[in-house]
Amino acid sequence: MQENKWIKRIFVNRQLENSPLVERIISRLKPTPVKLVDRLEEIQAELRLATDPIAESKRVLFLTDEKAFIRPCPCSPGAVPCGYWTIDLNLNCPLDCSYCILQAYFSLQPLTIAVNQKDLESELGAFLASTRTKVLRIGTGELGDSLALEAISGQASFLIDLFRDKKGVLLELKTKTAAIDSLLVSPPSENVVLAWSLNTERIIKMEEIGSASLGERVRSAERAVEHGFKVAFHFDPIIYYSGWEKEYGEVCEGLLKKIPPASLAWVSLGTLRFPGKLREIARQRFPESLIYEEELVRSWDGKLRYPRPLRLRIYQKLGEIFKAYGCSDRLYLCMESPEVWMDFSKQNKKGEAFSFPFF
Amino acid sequence: MELRQISLREINLEDTRFKFTLDKSDEKLSFSIQRAGLVEPVIVKSDGQAFILVTGWRRVEASRKFGLKEIMGLVTPSELTDLTLFSLAFFESYPKKNFSLAEKALIIKKFIEFGLSREEIIKEFLARLELPPERQTVDLLSQLACLDWALPSIHRGGWKLSTARLFLTFLPEEREAIIGLSEAFNHNQQAELIELLFTLKKRRKVGLDTILTEEELKPLVRAARERKPRAGLELLAALRERAFPLVTEINREIQAALRQINLPVNSRLDYDHSLEKSSLSISFEARTREEMELVVEQLKQKLKEGELDVLFGLLNKEIDE
Ligand code: SF4
């Protein structure tokens, strides 16, 4: 039995009651109460009655099946795409970041684990056979943290094994936890990148509820490197506040002193951005958070962002640090306009505006 | 229900337990009552001494105005509960009327008072009122409905749920100040006003009073309270400048630079005021090739002399902080 930090109740799709993975997950979560349901709506009807349905949805686990798993990453229209694909074996996330887009993206979606993971094998085979891209990046961290439920579901380990012999594909597992013990049991895989979203200690404490501390994340990354994995980092969202420059600088420097460039697969930078609807939800759920009250303007895709000159300043400042450590070729900007990319690249990547990926 | 003539004097208008509409009687209704009398009977409940109006508040108001002494009314059977009567009032209006948020708040509050459970309200009514069917909605609107002094302004202002949500985060005296100002603004401006005040208050960690009594804002606030023409717009502009200092400052510099540039006649310079784009565009009109050549020549000259450099510099401005 695992230590269960998150789940208060388990709902199981009645048709999958006898699935071995369902049985395994339930036994790992014992004595959490279990209820069989026929439809997702039955769970949603309960979530509606909660005073904070989003918080409640993160404590309720739904074991079910999904029809399809692989999708192109939904980049902002008009942004420079990075050609990323996502595998969504889990929906929703037990962590509770104040800026998390899932708050606005999902409506009454319980933490969902797709237990028909075997179906992914055939879907992946067909997908890889049909794609022409030379090097493909694919990851699981879009609709939830890749490792937060690992102790319960074992899905990351399953994926690592699934991708182990796949050529030309890079699997990225992205997390804000330090839950990598189970991944260090088997040998590393060349095409698996373990990634951490990083932020300053202040932002982690105030805005990333339930996540591991900065020190724990960096330490996990070091362990992953020692084990032989490649690692990646996402400074996303970078939050502007008085003192950002010093504190983000320290995080970057601290990281680059510990992670050898040879093990660094890529690093993304992305300043805070969100659709207006998220601000409405988050202001209510996180009344203490100040991140939504900075100067934010509606940008090209309708999302709110810091004014372009400020974003550029932030990217350039952090870019300089990576340059000093000889790693500027690993940097890319997430969901940014061609204009910002261009200005950023001029200084940091010597005119190579859109070179991606870096393998 | 029994249909009968009812003396208007017999109706106790003090008892508003079934009232949830906030519209006043309007021109159309007045005209129709004036010309044809009251065509559609109101619904009343008898409490033994007087009648309590279940539906027809606007009709009674207009009938009184035109000096009618009696109107047709349907008297409800005494065994019907107040919840049944309120449901009746609600369903009579529901197909005919788009309720404002303030009215929806009153509907929810009254259903709760008459004994309907929150669960039933969520299940049966919220989606039909075009509201998110969640407990939070019920809680928020019940809270809003308690501010009966503010409901008429909220009704007239056509507020959305998001505006009401922000409004309720203000302290009671701050809410009064906002409602006092609101009449100087149209629908969208009211939403923007509340958004800006919320942002500034939270960002600066001060009370609303500190913002509204700021030296430069004080006269604008006063003028808005007195509903002077353009006062609302000027106050909004001043608040925007405070909420968007970086964009405001760069725009101000660009405007100053633009005043120094003499563009050829019939031409116009544009740029993205949100500064998301760093490019500028110049458009002009010409009726002949010669006219066009002349404008192009003049523009070339200006470029050569570096007259536009300052603008390009500002649009690509790098900031230190
Ligand atoms: S870890 Fe990611 S998915 Fe989970 S709450 Fe935070 S931002 Fe959302």
Image (spheres, coloured by chain):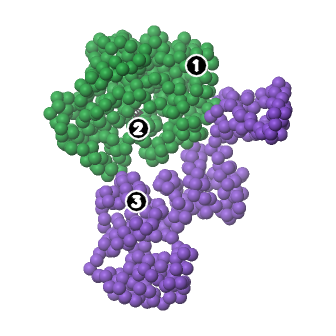
Chain colours: A green, B purple
Tags 2 and 1 in contact by the CB under 8 Å rule?
A: no
Q: Please give the name of the residue rendered at 21% of the width and 44% of the height, measured from the top-left corner.
A: A38
- How far is disc 2 from disc 3 in space, using C-alphas? 26 Å
Q: How many marks?
A: 3
Depicted B132 relative to depicted A3: above or below: below
Determine which quarter of the picture holds residue B226. Answer: bottom right
Name the residue tied to disc 1. Answer: A353
Instruction: Identify the amino acid type marked 3.
Output: Leu
Name the residue tied to disc 3. Answer: B129
Q: Please give the name of the residue rendered at 19% of the width and 32% of the height, measured from the top-left corner.
A: A22
Neighbor class of circle 3 (other Cα within 10 Å; few <14, some 14-19, many 20+) is: some
Observer-side mark, 2 or 1, equals: 1
**Marker disc for residue A102:** 2
Tag 1 or tag 2, which sits nearer the N-term?
Answer: 2
Dot 2 lies on which element? helix
Q: Chain of mark 2?
A: A
Q: Chain of mark 3?
A: B
Dot 3 lies on which element? helix
Instruction: Identify the amino acid type marked 1.
Output: Ala
Neighbor class of circle 1 (other Cα within 10 Å; few <14, some 14-19, many 20+) is: some
- Position in image of residue A72 (x %, y %): 41, 28
Instruction: Identify the amino acid type marked 2.
Output: Leu
Neighbor class of circle 2 (other Cα within 10 Å; few <14, some 14-19, many 20+) is: some
Q: Chain of mark 1?
A: A
